[in-house]
Image (cartoon, rainbow, N blue to C red):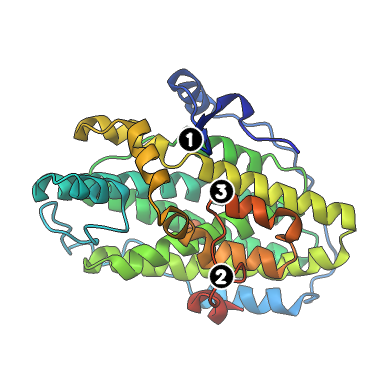
Amino acid sequence: MEKILAEYRRQLGAFELVEIDEDRIAALRRELDVEVPLELRWTWTYGSEVEELRSLYERGKRGQWNAETDVDWAQPLPRDEWFLPREGLQLLPSVLTAAGVDEATCREAGFDEFAYTISQLLHGEQAALQLCGQLTNACPTMDAKFYAASQVADEARHVEVLAKLIERKLGTIYPIGGTLKVLLDKLLAAPTWQTKTLGMQTLFEGMAVGILDMFQKGSTNPLVTDIIRRVKQDEARHAAFGILTMRRTVKEATPEEMIEMEDFAFNILETLNANQQLDMLQELGPKYGLDPDSVAQMVLQSPDWAKFNSQPYMHTVVPNLARLGLITERTEARYRARGIVFGDRFGTGTDGDVAASM
Ligand SMILES: [Fe+2]
Ligand SMILES: [Fe+2]
């Protein structure tokens, strides 16, 4: 099985980390032109063929909002107030608190890490915008084209709202992490609309729902809560598209194609997880006297690591893959060994916003 970024892997204890060197990351960021195969498909059937996608499209139309006028941008986001939990949600304030560092420094680190995370989400939103444009071309039914087109508008709004949040309140757009750039390019360059749907709509949208839900629940700042809530409701529709479309795709797949999709999903999520936030730690660690490797080692050795690490995965993406038959006994142990699957692989239930979109 192909291992993504094989040349940038190394062992840290029992864990295989992915860490891309600075020169390569700089080169990745300069790669603005990406060769992508795109099969454009006409259809002459303008009536609805896939009822559930047509109603998702209707839901999408009703769910539109304006990032400039519906968000109350006058609300403050002060640097000197906690608006996320000090421990447990973000890595830097948790580590610094455990090390006995003063509160003001921990708070600043939390603010920086939030700006870093929102920046990565922003770059991911741009990839989603581009990918949905591809799906509008490539999907075979008008229902899917309508739906994908409405998602293009959603993703443009997400790029807009996150860029404005950073520009107006957070101050710094951090550049894209190397691992994320490689994975997003892989999805954009995936050969078929089915693989693109699996990669972006099922894996990345599912991750987005999990991460955004954790931030929405943790935030005590009204502006942040409102923006995250709005984006997450849209992402839940996008994840629903992933599930609805993949349900049909797996029904028609051969056993070989199922294995291919299961491996593809594992490879993407395994690589994302194998970075263990080293990209973030390289960017922000030095400012707080933190050595990225030592932090990663400490995190990996903590007794609750897998439970904590698996949270954004177990929220939506893993249960969805398991229900689609794309995490089976064949790959489950590998997911568990890497701290991605923890507990029941079907999770504890479907996210409320995703369930409401189905
Ligand atoms: Fe989005
Ligand atoms: Fe999305």
Q: In the rendered image of this protein, does residue 354 appear above or below residue 159?
A: below
Indicate if the residue with disc 1 has its beta carbon within 8 Å of ligand 2. no
Q: Residue at x 70, y 62 (%)?
A: 145
Q: Which mark is residue 13?
A: 1
Residue 259 lies left or right of residue 275; in this view the side is right
Residue 123 lies left or right of residue 161; in this view the side is right
Quadrant of the image occupied by residue 242:
bottom right
Helix, strand or loop under label 3: loop
Of circles 3 and 1, the one toward us is 1
Q: In the rendered image of this protein, does residue 158 appear above or below residue 353?
A: above
Helix, strand or loop under label 1: loop
Three-letter amino acid code at the position of disc 1 = Gly
Label 3 sits on residue: 338
Q: Nearer the viewer, residue 120 or 331?
A: 331
Label 2 sits on residue: 237
Three-letter amino acid code at the position of disc 2 = Arg
User: Residue 177: image x %, image y %?
Assistant: 44, 36
Q: Residue at x 70, y 78 (%)?
A: 52
Q: Is residue 25 visible?
A: yes
Residues under labels 2 and 3: Cα distance?
29 Å
Quadrant of the image occupied by residue 136:
bottom right
Three-letter amino acid code at the position of disc 3 = Arg
Helix, strand or loop under label 2: helix
Q: Nearer the viewer, residue 311 or 22?
A: 311
Split into 4 quadrants, where in the image is the N terminus? top right
Of circles 1 and 2, the one toward us is 1
User: Residue 18: image x %, image y %?
Assistant: 52, 33
Count of marks placed on residues: 3
